Image (spheres, rainbow, N blue to C red):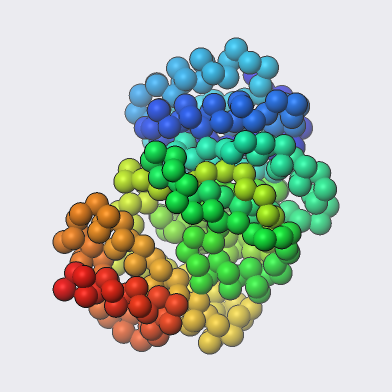
Amino acid sequence: MIQQDKLLSICIPAYNRPIWFERTLRSIVANINENKQYVEVVISDDSDSDECSTIVGEILTPLNISYQYVHNQLRLGMAANWNHSIQLASGKYILVLHDDDFLLKDAVEKIIKVIKNNQKEYPVMLFGVHVVNEQEKVKKKQLFKRKLYLPPEKALVKVLSNSSFIRFPSIVIRRDIFKQIGYFDPEIGEIADLDMWIRILIKHGLLCLPNAISAYTIHTNALTTEMFNKKTINMLLSLFSRVEKLNILDSKQVEKCKSDFIHQFILAGTYRQIKRGNFRDALDIMELFKQTCLDKLPISIKWFWLRLLFRLALA
C-alpha cells in the first residue's frame, strides 16, 4: 500500500538477514501507533532469497501501514541499495534503518515531534542511539545531554575525529538534501557514509537531540567487517585531503582529526578480531599503522594508551 506526502520515510536496505529484518519491521510496527498517517516504510531488498518478501507479507500487508517493497532482481551492492531505498521514498524526511538495527520504544513519536518543531530551521537531525550486541544487551548509550545545534565547522570536527559519532539509525535527513548534493557514492565502498556526512554537514550543520531512538547492533556478520585494510586507509586519507582543500578547517585541525579518526578506526578493527580470538588478523590490522602512507600521522593522545596496550598484547 502506497500513500503520498508522508513526513517520515523509514528506509530499510535489506540483505540476507531475514531474522533480524523481521525484528526491524516489528520494532517499526510497534512504534507507529497514532503516527501512521505521517510514516511510510520503504524496503529495498538485495537478498538472494524471497524470505524478506514473505516476512513483509506477514507483518505489513495485514496492517493499515503505508509501505513499499522492492526485491532487486540483480544485487545493487551496499551503497547503491542505500540509495535505492531513499530514491523510492516519498517522505519529507528520511531515516535509513539497516536490517540489523531496530527502533526503541516511542521512537517514531519522538522523531515526528522533533520534525514538526524544527523542520523550518534544521534539515539534519542526530538523535541518541543504544549500541547493542547480538543478544540486544546494551553495551553503550550514545546520547547528547541537551538539544544543541552544531554549525558546519564544529559538526565537521566531531564527525572527522570520531568514526562512530554518526551512526546510521540515529540520523534523520530531509529528503531534498540528497537531490541537492547527490546520493551515497558506491565507488568509495565502505566509507560512503562518512563521505555523505561530510557533504551534508558542510552545508547544513547538525541539530543534536537528547532522545535515543534506535539500537545499533554490533556483530560479526556486519557488511563492514572486512573494511579494515590498506585500501580503506588510502580512501580515508584522500577524504581528509579533500576536506583540507575546502578551507573550512585549518590544517592543524584536519591533522588532529585525521590522527584521532584513523587511530580509532584501526584500533576498533583490532578489537573486533581480538574479541573473536583471531589474533593473527588483529595483528594484521595493527600493522596498518606501519603503512608508508601513515608515516607522518601524528600520534593521537586520545588513543595512545590503547594503541600501546594492543601492541604489547599482540607482540
Q: Tell me the residue at 53%/48% (across/down).
A: 130
Q: Position of residue 19 (x, y in %)?
A: 40, 28
Q: Is residue 48 left or right of residue 253?
A: left
Q: Is residue 184 left or right of residue 78?
A: right
Q: Is residue 186 left or right of residue 95?
A: left
Q: Is residue 39 left or right of residue 246?
A: right
Q: Position of residue 231 (x, y in %)?
A: 32, 64
Observer-nearest of 293 and 55: 55
Q: Is residue 256 above or below residue 267?
A: below
Q: Position of residue 257 (x, y in %)?
A: 50, 76
Observer-nearest of 162 and 302: 302
Is residue 97 in view?
A: yes
Q: Tell me the residue at 40%/55% (across/down).
A: 189
- Point out the image quarter for the C terminus: bottom left
Q: Position of residue 136 (x, y in %)?
A: 44, 40
Q: Quadrant of residue 155?
A: bottom right
Observer-nearest of 188 and 111: 111
- Point out the image quarter for the N terminus: top right
Is residue 168 in view?
A: no
Q: Is residue 240 above or below residue 102?
A: below
Q: Tell me the residue at 29%/78% (across/down).
A: 308
Q: Tell me the residue at 64%/54% (across/down).
A: 126
